[in-house]
Amino acid sequence: MTNVSMKSDSFEPATETAAHLLDNWFDPIESGVRERVREFIEALICGELDAALARPRYGRAKNEDACSAGIVGHRHGSRTRSLTGSFGKTEITVPRARLQTSDGRTTTEWHSKALRTYQRRTLTADALIAGAYLAGTNTRRVRRALAALFRGAVSKDIVSRVWRKIKSDWDAWNARSLAAEPIVRLILDGTVVRVRLDRKATLISLLVVIGVREDGQKVLLAVKNMGGESAEAWRTVLDDLIARGLRRPAFLIVDGAPGLEKASAAVWDGVPVQRCTVHKHRNLLAHAPERLHEEIGADYTDMIYAATPEDIAARRKAFIRKWRLKHRPVADSLEEAGDRLFSFAQLPPSQWRSARTTNAIERLHEEFKRRIKTQTVLPSAETAAMLFWALVASGQINMRKVDGWQTLATRTIDQPIDLAA
């Protein structure tokens, strides 16, 4: 009994220390800023009203000042508003005033431009809430993650309302006109995600289209959730872009999916199409045992990154001759891609790096998958597409200009290089 008692006593100092572990974490700077936020906001709004009435509170303005301001009115009390920002939740006193209308017969209520009617959160607060949600978490986790910053002022309902605002922006983005977009090149690819449909986890495809403007800037044009990457699915995406005014592109970069190539040929017959060289490299390796992968990769890289169209053609012939004898499925896989694997050689050499692959979309796919890693199943197919779009729309991913953008105005070579084996 004595030993037990001694052990119990020995834990008391440690428990007491743990209870006061965070006592010295008080930040006088942070506390001081938060305490003065109310004063600052109230002073800001009062200054706005003083400017509108052309006189300070309890002051009188000369008639000519009021006339020159074009506003005549009077204050009539104040009201209390609750505002949540990165500074937390605070109660502020907002002054009220009545302004005469232009006919001079009636008056209207004055409204602050800094603090909008019915506004309960700052734009920064909404951006923080949306950013946390877009990071791949759910409404409850957002509430818990931001509780300390907002002092517990963010409820699940607030997160949902912010998300509904994002939903309205998403709908507007999907319906926007593309007639004024100077698109000269398209990059198209799809990715698979798991979503909840009829209470069951289901795999769907997100079909993504990136456009390249005349100045080389990449821009996201479409993200559609579809059942797969069939020709019909891709045709739906392309028809929607055309219906909204997208001009005929001068060059297409695709991942090699048969459905995409069939759909693009149906709507833009004659446009040069580039098969992604990275996807084809993976296909070649899939047709060979692992012991041959290094050798295949070396030969393939030597061919794809040759300096001139003539060198590419010569090395392609050598690749096919060698692998027909050594492991024919590899040669057959390369021949399957045909001329489309080398369409980039029709462009100026400065553009080859950006035209060989769909890497611009692959980067978006990777970042999107990283963000949703904590959610094994997304709530719905539409939510998946919205999350993908919001990564770019919110500025969390920035797309730079393509390499060689200075020569985008240069026409492609009319005749492809000689690729006959």
Image (tube, grey):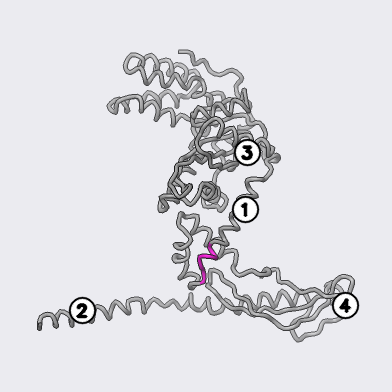
Q: Could you tell me if the residues under marks 4 and 3 are in contact, i.e. CB atoms within 8 Å?
A: no
Quick check: 22 above or below 203?
below
For residue 49, side relative to residue 303 (left or right): right
Q: Which residue is mark 3?
A: 213
Q: Earlier in the sequence, mark 2 or mark 1?
A: 2
Q: Which residue is mark 1?
A: 169
Q: Which residue is mark 4?
A: 64
- The boundaries of the magenta stretch are 153-159
Q: Residues within 10 Å of mark 2 (few under 14, many from 20)?
A: few
Question: Residue reaching furthest front?
Answer: 198
For badge 1, the amino acid type reads: Asp
Q: Residues within 10 Å of mark 1 (few under 14, many from 20)?
A: some
Read off the residue under disc 2.
11
Comparing marks 1 and 4, which lies closer to the viewer? 1
Foreground mark, 3 or 2?
2
Give amino acid for label 3: Arg
From the top left corner, tell me how far across and down residue 165 is, in percent.
60, 58
Is 191 one of the magenta-colored residues?
no
- For label 2, the SS is helix
* Label 4, label 3: how far apart the Cα atoms are: 54 Å
Q: Quadrant of residue 105?
A: bottom right
Separation of marks 2 and 4 at Cα, in angstroms: 79 Å
